[in-house]
Amino acid sequence: MVTRAVVKGVGHYLPERVVENAEFEKTLDTSDEWIRSRSGIERRHFAAPDETTSDLATHAARAALKDAGMSADELDAVILATSTPDLTFPSCATMVQAALGMKRGFAFDLQAVCAGFIYALATANAMIISGQARRILVIGAETFSRILDWSDRSTCVLFGDGAGALILEAAEAPGEKTDRGILAVDLNSDGQYRDILYADGGVSTGKSGHVRMQGNQVFRHAIEKLAATAEAALAKAGLRDEDVDWIVPHQANIRIIRGTAKKMKHSMDQVVVTVQDHGNTSAASIPLALSVGKARGQIRPGDLLVTEAIGGGLTWGAVVLRW
Ligand code: ACO
């Protein structure tokens, strides 16, 4: 028998304010048609001025706890992936811990930009397998609207705010490909690409900075690296492309999502797509897609999922899990 990290609940939260592409036409030399055709994005949610990343995360966490039929006291840990924390410190994870009234266990943030949720799942999985914790709340939450340059049409139309959360619980399993839970993980980074996607500020620069991206350069890396990491994770699990029921990709661009699915020889019927309604919510995009995919009735118990993401760094990776 082996220990697996099994999904017990999922939930998400999107801020109330929805901004359609057409709104950007008022202030920028852009169009709904350009944004739709180049990215697949139609609208995104933006947080209210007094709403922070930990607020979004707390809503998503409550939804996941409700879905799992669990109370916060039953959690051993909170791992929160974000690049847009409320404060330099303490972490958003400890803020969520306090908001949930959870007085035991441990909580910390993790930062791998758009690949953050994959890194957080990998970390939670390792902690569960090693016996460090039995129940972990894994959150991806972002307020990218706070780090967008509203005069830069090549970035500000692409991102949105939101949060998603998953609860993983230790379960004993036979150690087979048919087990439920996380079956394999593949993580990568290559710091030589920092200049194609970064924020031009941070604590030691004295300003929070704005997203800067050479979109076509990131695009060039995306399809190849995402397909390769998904295939690597599947190979580690002893599984193949044809075993996959659902690809749950990072939601940055519909052309990247289509290209990766094609490279993995999957039709788009087996891909969960939310980019049209959420835009790129960075570390929140995968848990949002998991939660929406489940709510739509696409993802069902026993389905084999491969989820993959690429982000600033560059950082990229994939997780294979049976729902
Ligand atoms: N409206 C109108 N025109 C625009 C806009 C806009 N909003 N933005 C850029 N353009 C123009 C450019 O200025 C350029 O004009 P030029 O040819 O006169 O110079 C032209 O459109 C083409 O620009 P490209 O950047 O080559 O367009 P491309 O087809 O590559 O699409 C996009 C741009 C959507 C950004 C795409 O490259 C992309 O999605 N890249 C990947 C982004 C991604 O995956 N990020 C993931 C990680 S995000 C993270 O980690 C935080």
Image (tube, rainbow, N blue to C red):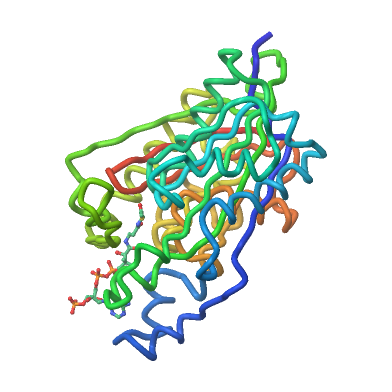
Q: Residue at x 47, y 51 (%)?
A: 250
In the picture, which quadrant includes the C terminus?
top right
Front residue of 264 and 73: 73
Q: Is residue 127 left or right of residue 200?
A: right
Rendering quarter of residue 130: top right
Rendering quarter of residue 315: top left
Q: Residue at x 61, y 63 (%)?
A: 14
Q: Position of residue 190 (x, y in %)?
A: 24, 37
Front residue of 13 and 71: 71
The image quadrant where one finds ligand 1 is bottom left
Q: Position of residue 251 (x, y in %)?
A: 48, 57
When the figure is inspected, residue 126 is found, relative to residue 60, above or below; the finding is: above
When the figure is inspected, residue 289 is found, relative to residue 182, above or below; the finding is: below
- Residue projecting furthest to the top: 1
When the figure is inspected, residue 6 is found, relative to residue 133, above or below; the finding is: below
Q: Position of residue 271 (x, y in %)?
A: 57, 53
When the figure is inspected, residue 241 is found, relative to residue 295, above or below; the finding is: above
Q: Residue at x 33, y 42 (%)?
A: 225
Q: Is residue 94 left or right of residue 87?
A: right
In the picture, which quadrant includes the N terminus?
top right
